[in-house]
Image (cartoon, coloured by chain):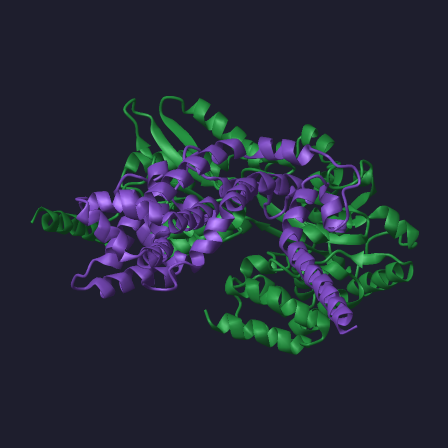
Chain colours: A purple, B green
Amino acid sequence: MSHMQMTTKERVLCVLKYLFLALCVFVALFPIIWVIMSSFKTNAEILSNGVALPKTPSLTGYRNALTISPILNYFGHSIIITTVSTVLNVLFLAMAAYVFARCRFRGRDVLYFILSLAMVIPMTALLHPVYSVIQALGLYDTKTGLILVYTALNLPMSLLILRGTFLSIPRALEEAAYVDGAGFVRTFFQIMLPCAKGGLTSAAVLAFLQSWNEFTFALVLTSGQDARTLPLSLSYFTAQFSFDYPAMFAAVTIAVIPSIIVFAVFQEQVVSSLTAGSVKE
Amino acid sequence: MKRRALAILLLGVMCLGLLTGCGGKKTEEPAAGTSDDGVITINYPTFQCGVNTAAPVVAQLVKEFNEEYAGKYQIKLEEIPGDANYVDKIKVQLGTGDLPPVVYGAGYNLLDLALAKDLVVDLTDIVNADPEWKALYSDAALTTNSRDGKIYASSVEGSVVGYFYNKDLFAQAGIEAPAKTWDEFFQQCETLKAAGITPLALDTADSAWVTQLWWGAMVATASENGLAFMQTMNPDDYNFDEMVAAVEKVQKMLQDYTTLDAIGGKYEHAANNFLSGQAAMIANGPWMIGDFSDTSKTTADFADKVGSAIYPDNFVYDAPIQGYFVTKQDDPKLEEAAIAMVKFFTSAHAQQLGLEMQGMVPASSSVEISADAAATYPLLVEFLSQASEATVRSDNMQATMYSNLLDVVSQELPRLASGELDAAAFCQALTDAAAKN
């Protein structure tokens, strides 16, 4: 009898658990579903009854999105700029993080503190100096300029994650490599980097997402159509006295799909590596 | 040793980058100047792109300018979609002294910001020496575009703003014509409400453009003192009887005569409430006329149901929008090109083009409404005819108030609507915010 009561309680708890999880899923997915659903509605439907299903689903929003703004062009730029800046960011920051994690040298902690401090500097405070530097380097309105900026913008977070990852890898692995005759560079690239795969993926995903979504620098550091990125295209659909919400939501749908795919594919690595490194050897 | 040398070298490069960023030396204007073939390129950033109703007009003007000045000048259009994004970018360029050769001040008063940094070219002598150009400046246009007696900018667009009403809804409530006085106006609101019709489409977010039009009209027509306030640039005292009385009426409008989504709603919500026949009146400019026949926003026959009116007590908003100005450049030839562009973009032809393509009200009264424009925008013709009869005129409140007050209006209007603030406290909040300038 007691056993039966426990089972019933467990069942109730189980149902409650799933209800709670369903609620979480609903809260997380609702904005995305709403945006996708709205992309098939008309302006009047969106503004009159935002949560209702479209009366007659239409692809006009997608047609307008592709006509009003150079969204596909910007999409291509976003892929190039985000991919290159992510690769550079992870490559350079992995090197830096390994040194911070393993080497002892004067001023190491101070330098690490200064680099981490960049995380708390508001982006608007960086606008003027970054604009001036990019101008002076002749990189205004170029993909290279944005790649450089995005590589640097993601520095503190990547450094934090990767240093933690390297700290969590046992020193014995490196020592074994050195005993077998590997040098510093070879040990780093052939032993340590494969071991830090989780952290590298995590840093890469976060850097990718930030670069993919970044708006302010993409606006300020570009002028033509050769280097602009996807977030800018979303501004083409609203002005002070005119708006085309279906086209905007269609563009948002096109814009968020890659982010969702990247996160969905690598989510396990991201979550696991965010917690990795919390325990030091 | 090699590693240390490399480290020092990299440190040097990093420091050089830092110094470059912090240095005060003015850098060259990006993508502007003289090319190898002698053509001067004018880099022109504009927010009039995408869904902005003026986008086709600007594109056409750029095309015509480039054809007329082929081999000499060329405009390179830089699209900055979104009004706020445009203002943000211009402000960053102001900070670094890298303004583009031509800037459109629009409704954002960028002229004063650029003047504060002494970056604007004085056009007084050039305009005075050109009778054709000078003739396009009305007294109001001179006021808008001049500072201390010097002309710095040139307007292309007028801002004549009244309100629109739904003739079908008026007829349903038994109202025959728009109100001539404010008492009659509020009586009409009561009549509409009694007939189950929401009288007004209002908003509170994004500085409450629609709501503040009604509010300003009540202030301007209250007394000489109210009108003087409306004609003052950057007024700092909102604590006077006419203002408090007008705010009390705005409170009543928000509480009794509008839709639920007006509180916290933006212009789009107000526009949709009018376009979908849920509200009988909306205050707005003629640029909205195109929406009345846009089937993605309303029904096909909606345009036939809309009438226009000036505000009670014979008031209409009438002030040219701040125009284009030329910024100081290292290359005098680039400045010359920029002046040619400003003259072209604000010419009688440009104003006519804006009228015909967009239904834009010309800045100059000497620009006549062509038969084509009258056929395309009959409501505009009707409205301009009504506006010409108005006896009280001023700029709108949003254009003259300190820019930091725009957010205060958006924050405090919902509190006014809920009764958390009374009219006097609302006016005090505005006065306090104005005092911070």
| Identity of the residue drawn at 29% across and 54% down | A97
Residue at x 69% of width, y 28% of height: B372
Of residue A206 and residue B417, the one placed in the foreground of this image is A206
- Asked whether A176 or B258 is in front, the reply is A176
| Residue B25 drawn at (x, y percent) | 23, 50
* Rendered location of residue B65, percent (x, y): 46, 28
Nearer to us in this view, B181 or B96: B96
Q: Is residue A239 left or right of residue B261?
A: left
Percent of width and height locating residue B166:
82, 48
Q: Image point 45% across, 69% down: which residue?
A: B437
- For the question of whether residue B120 can be seen, the reply is no
Q: Residue at x 35, y 25 (%)?
A: B72
Q: How many marks?
A: 0
The part of the image, by quadrant, that contains residue A260 is: top right
Seen in the image, is B88 located left or right of residue B307?
left
Q: Is residue A123 above or below residue A177?
A: below
Is any atom of residue B406 visible in this view?
yes
Vertical position of residue B299 compared to residue A104: above or below: above
Residue B6, percent across and down? Answer: 13, 47
- Furthest toward the left, the residue is B1
